[in-house]
Image: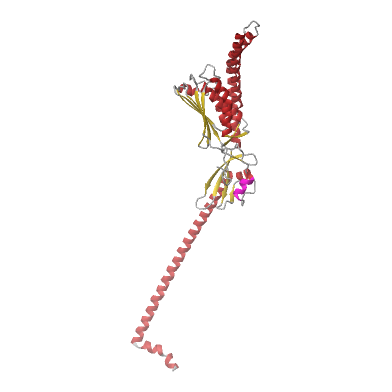
Amino acid sequence: MANTAQHLPQDIAATPEGKQDLEQAYALFSRMSEQLRESQGLLEQQVAQLKAELAEVSAKRTRELAEKARLAGRLQNLLDLLPGGVIVLDGRGVVRETNPVARELLGEPLEGQLWRELIRDRFAPRDDDYHEVSLRSGRRVSIATRSLRGEPGQIILLTDLTETRQLQAQLARNERLSALGRMVASLAHQIRTPLSTALLYASHLNQPELSGTHRQRFSQRLKDRLQTIELQVRDMLMFAKGDLPLNNQVTAQSLFAELQQQAETLISESGADCRWDDRAPAGVRLLCNQETLIGAALNLIENAIQAGAPTPRLKVIQRLQEGRLSISVVDGGRGMSREELARIGEPFYTTRDQGTGLGVSVVKSVAQAHGGAFMLRSRAGQGSWAELVLPVLPQMVKGGTMA
């Protein structure tokens, strides 16, 4: 049995059919070997290609990471060098990133703190802040915010305006002093005439033989001349002050009532018909220098009375307009031409024989000192509209927030 199995291949090969089968099996084996060699070559090529592609991708990724690191370093450098303070908040209002200017303005620590707590601890708002906010350090900053893109949170920009405001105030003072220097000579000339007249009337009053009627007439003329001088000096002093302490916090209603009371004598002596219209809502408050502000408004009323109408008719209106307090004086006088209106505000320019030429300059100066503005509209033959526009204090509404 074993011998038969041992000699079986020779027996098969000995037959023609067996030999043919072996040849076919050998050919099949050769083809499969060739295919395996080809497949191995293809696999080796693919592996080599994949290795090359992987190396290229890895090199590209390395370059991208290096570029991103360089860009991140550049952005961080720019953030550190920005002249403004930058604060990044997450969606919960927690500070996640700051730059050196923000840390210098607000102090440390900042990162990890709630922004609302930083507002409470580091800010100290004042009544005269207006568009800026004061810090406990005494500096003033403006605040701008933007929402982050693609993620919850905000970016806050703090701009230090302390030196800017100081320079603006210094520039305004220098300009005022320069104008004041030019005014001194003009004021001396303006005062000389009424002063000489007043001295003449005073010398007449010294005469013992002067009758009672003449004495009364000269006394009244002396008083008129002295009042003219007093008005010129008052207007000059108000113009020269400029940088006024805003230490009176008043309601719009009380300011309007005080103005009406102080204007009563002026209006009654002139025989003017004046209507008072207070449209400002209750509770509106403003920070001001009440004495100079009322003095400026009285200047406008006096101008309206002397506007040239035989029987002066004027209206004083107070209203809240676009979040600011407006005090307007409207008259039905002769009005002004475009040329006259263009020159109003120049020191010592006046359209009246007895005018000081400082009234409108004073009003402008007072308005600017209050952070407000002065506007004048007029048309020849139709009267004038003079308006003081002043900032008001934020109002508290329900919930303790500011309106």
Which residue is depicted at the point 43% across and 69% down? Answer: 41
In percent of width and height, residue 26 lies at 38, 80
Q: Residue furthest bottom?
A: 1
**Which image quadrant is residue 382 in?**
top left
Task: Please give the name of the residue rendered at 42% of the width and 68% of the height, measured from the top-left corner.
Answer: 42
Tell me the chief SS of the magenta region. Answer: helix
- Residue 272 in view here: yes
Looking at the picture, does residue 46 appear above or below residue 231?
A: below
Which quadrant: the C terminus? top right
Instruction: In the displayed orientation, state which residue is furthest to the left.
Output: 16
Residue 82, image quadrant = top right
Looking at the image, which is closer to me, 174 or 385?
385
Q: Is residue 200 above or below residue 255?
A: above
Q: Which residues are magenta?
A: 114-121
Left or right placement of residue 92 versus residue 14 in this view: right
Q: Position of residue 337 (x, y in %)?
A: 45, 22
Residue 345 location (% of width, % of height) = 52, 24
Q: Is residue 130 magenta?
A: no
Where is residue 303 drawn, in percent x and y?
53, 22
Q: Which quarter of the rendered picture does the N terminus lie within?
A: bottom left
Colouring rule applied to residues = secondary structure
183 to the left or right of 383: right
Residue 116 lies in the magenta-colored region = yes
The tally of labels here is: 0
Residues 306 and 17: in front is 306
Viewer-side residue, 88 vs 254: 254
List the single residue furthest toward the top: 209
